[in-house]
Amino acid sequence: MSIVLVVNSGSSSLKYQLLDVETGHPLASGLVERIGTTDGHVKHTASVAGDGEPTVWDTAVDAPDHDAAFAVMLEAFASHGPSLEEHAPVAVGHRVVQGGARFFEPTVITELVKINIDELSVLAPLHNPANLAGIVAAERAFPGVPHVAVFDTAFHQTMPPAAYTYAIDRALAEKHRVRRYGFHGTSHRFVSRAAAEFLGRPVEELQLIVLHLGNGASACAVAEGRSIDTSMGMTPLEGLVMGTRSGDIDPAVLLHLQRRAGLDADATDRLLNSQSGILGLSGHADMRDLEAAREAGDEASVIAFDVYTHRLRSYIGAYAAQLGRVDAIVFTAGVGENSATVRAAALAGLDWFGVEVDDERNRSRERGARRISTDASRTAVLVVPTNEELEIARQALEVVRG
């Protein structure tokens, strides 16, 4: 038995997927959204292999809390398939954003683990409480099944102190757990192993730079299968320019804005997380819209694109120095997988360490893992679709199988 239910619980949403880990095939997926409001909604898609066209249930529902959302999910399986009696999960894998320095591997959820996830909410107040609410509701819905927490931060727990330590007062940092944790770890782990499989080499032999470029974006230096550095920090705000997040910024800018523009802590938080990035620079949060405006000659969009790709090149160069040798640069997630323009601009001028991009391959609309560098390129450049749900399912299954 290799069927796992993967749960990603947000403050007002429940995303789920039922997977056969052995085949990698999703049997069903769904999203219950607007939990806690009067206009809840569910979309459930059942896609059991060999059963023809997928069955889709798309309707308004009543979901005042996460328990009700799980009841909606169970109704979806019962009414629209697949049957959870015939396809019973052997584990439930939960995405948990912040594991701090306490969790460095997937962990069977116990009362103590839930206490720890709750205590770590101070480091991820928008995510861990919602993740925990989903865990509690899922345990009620699936009481006889092992539940496993898979932490976004766990993959980065192999970073050395030089990479995760901020240069501030040591005692203050330790008291308040201020350090770099990194995020998107589940994706970076999946993609680095998928890239190694594509190249036909053990991941333990490879030095990789993985670029997870979506609305949120992060870079990761992966040495022999281990994260040794990553761009996100104590929170997902640090690092690359993103859809609405600023990424790296001089901290004194914030002090200046507090003094001169009267921004308080909440306004500063909104500015950096929701009103910055390419949105703040151009008015467009979606890279597709930004590229279209750039092509039309919009000056703000030209600058925003250049800032975005300049930061990317900076991190690629920094991680090349950390790794010493780069066997492959790997693009993934929505922008990374779909924007040939971003990929080409991010790699421009990097021929000095053996990057040769094949323009035709780069612009190909082929799906799946593929090479976009020339055959002669000393450093391979790959596009590898991420699959965080499958990675969570794999890790959960490994834990319950021992």
Image (spheres, rainbow, N blue to C red):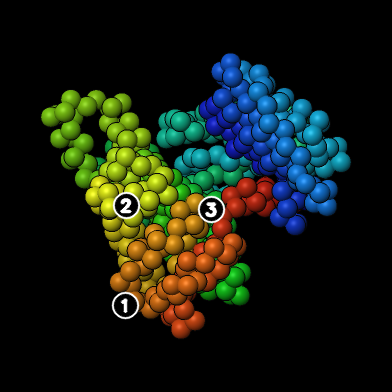
Q: Earlier in the sequence, mark 1 or mark 2?
A: 2
The three-letter amino acid code for the residue at tag 1 is Trp
Question: Viewer-proximal residue, 369 or 200?
Answer: 369
Q: Position of residue 193 (x, y in %)?
A: 58, 63
- Helix or strand or loop: what does disc 3 sit on? helix
Return the residue nearer the eye: 71 or 368. 368
Helix, strand, or loop for circle 1?
Answer: helix
Q: Is residue 136 left or right of residue 239?
A: right
Q: Position of residue 48 (x, y in %)?
A: 79, 47
Which one is closest to the eye, mark 1 or mark 3?
Answer: 1
Q: CA distance from mark 1 to mark 2?
A: 32 Å
Kind of residue indicated by mark 3: Ser
**Is 308 placed above or below 348 here?**
above
Which of the two residues, 57 or 118, is positioned nearer the viewer here?
A: 57
Please tell me the numbered disc located at residue 187.
3
The residue at which mark 1 appears reads as 352
How many numbered discs?
A: 3
Kindly state the secondary structure of the residue where label 2 is placed.
Answer: loop
> For mark 1, does the 10 Å Cα neighbourhood hold few (<14), some (14 to 19), or many (20 or more) residues?
few
Extreme residue toward the front, this view: 296
Residue drawn at x 59%, y 19% as measured from the top left: 39
| Residue for badge 2 | 296
Q: Is residue 193 visible?
A: no
The residue drawn where x is 49% and y is 40% is 98
- Residue 395 at what x, y percent from top left? 65, 51
Q: Residue furthest bottom?
A: 376
